[in-house]
Image (cartoon, coloured by chain):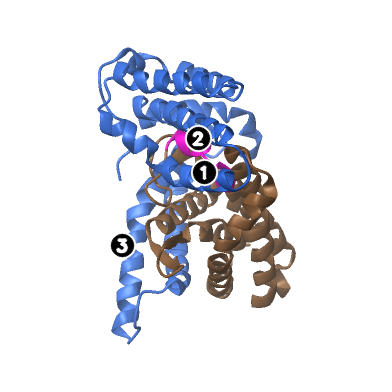
Amino acid sequence: MLPLYYHANSPIHLTPAPYKLVLCLGLSAALVFIPSVWGMATATLAIAALYAVARLPLRTVLAALRPVVIATVIIFALHAAFSDWHSAVLIVLRLMALVLLSTLVSLTTPFSDMLDVLSRAARPFARFGVSPPNVALAVALTIRFIPTLLHDMQEIQRARMARGGKRASLFALGPLIVKILSMTNALGNAIAARGFENRK
Amino acid sequence: MRTQDIAYIALFGALTAVLGLIPTVYLAGGQVPISAQSLGPMLAGSVLGARRGAASQLLLLLIVASGLPILAGGRGGLGVFVGPTAGFLIAFPIAAFVIGLFAERLWQRLTFVKLLAINIVGGIIVVYAFGIPGWAFAAGKPVTDVAWLCAVFLPGDAIKVAIASAVGMFVKRGYPLI
């Protein structure tokens, strides 16, 4: 499991993450107000051209658009039944522009930079215990838990099979959660015992 | 918040990510894969309660937004928050909170049937209450059209609610945390 970030040397990569996020938000909001199909097509092409500026290979553009394909089919199906093609094309182009723009930010910003900006943006929630050290610990633990959970899930499924279960089942989540909760409790104690200070 | 709570929150964030990796239920003759990911908010709410459950889902969204592709189908990054399914994602923490709130209130007298009802409210009604308007906005169509489209997913959701409730009761007996 690798982050989306694609390393290259470009002005877009060098722009600090907060600026990119604010620009992305502003442009996304502006895109909603473009009324004509041609205007929207120009905007979409301009955003696609930014991928070239960022020195990203063509396949990243296609990969970014992959989730939009199914949505496009459904939108056209919905619109063809009731209304004009004009609005369907406009909406699909807008969707492509929005997804391309926000994916560009994700592709050109390293995971840790983005995490840093977003957890700083969450500072107003400090009174609920959302302090940067707590968020950092939680993120690190989550990423570490993913392979552990996959491993334990396989182990439990194999044990089911050995006892005569016919196929993998989601009911194995019960034993998995109970097993891993007791491990997590011990882990929490161990972190606290090593002096991780929790002010809230 | 204790350090254990941070660990529990991280655990359910990770569990929701792992559930997105295993496509399990197939609908319409194997044509429509339904990801198990939406089990995540249901389990987080009914095992951890409202606050920690919602926090675990917010943590997942934070990691997704930062660019780790841990949503079903290997999706991630900021793009998923402007796509047509953004409403469903935003609903995850809210669903976990609602389920957790009811589970906490009824904890001493919680039965499978009650948890089933709670999961229907939080895991189906709340999720679609945000998901359908999100779709409708992205597609530029009235909410009612999209609602009919979403009816396809209801059988899969029914299975997931049943699994989440059975697992929730199992964990309540084996390792109650609320």
- Whether pointer 1 and pointer 3 mark residues with C-beta atoms closer than 8 Å, the reply is no
Name which residue lies at 38% across and 43% down. B69
Nearest the viewer among A33 and A179 is A33
Q: Earlier in the sequence, mark 3 or mark 2?
A: 2
In the rendered image, the vertical position of residue B141 relative to residue B145, given as above or below: above
Instruction: Estimate the spatial distance between the alpha carbons at disc 1 and disc 3, rounded to whole Å.
Output: 42 Å
Point 65% across, 71% down: residue? B116
Using the numbered discs, state the Cα–Cα distance from disc 2 to disc 1 in whole angstroms. Answer: 8 Å
- Could you tell me the amino acid type at mark 1? Phe
Question: What residue range appears in magenta?
Answer: B77-89
Chain assignment, label 1 = A
Task: Identify the residue under disc 2.
Answer: A92
* Residue drawn where x is 30% and y is 75% of the image: A158
Relative height, residue B44 to residue A39 (above, below): below
Chain A colour in the picture? blue
Image coordinates for residue B18, horizontal then vertical, percent: 40, 56
**Magenta stretch containing residue B80, yes or no?**
yes
Given residues A176 and A167, the one toward you in this image is A167
Q: Position of residue B103 (x, y in %)?
A: 68, 64
What residue is disc 1 on? A76
Q: Are marks 1 and 3 on the same chain?
A: yes
Residue count near mark 3 (Cα–Cα under 10 Å), binned few <14, some 14–19, many ≥20: few
Q: x, y (%) of residue B77?
A: 42, 36
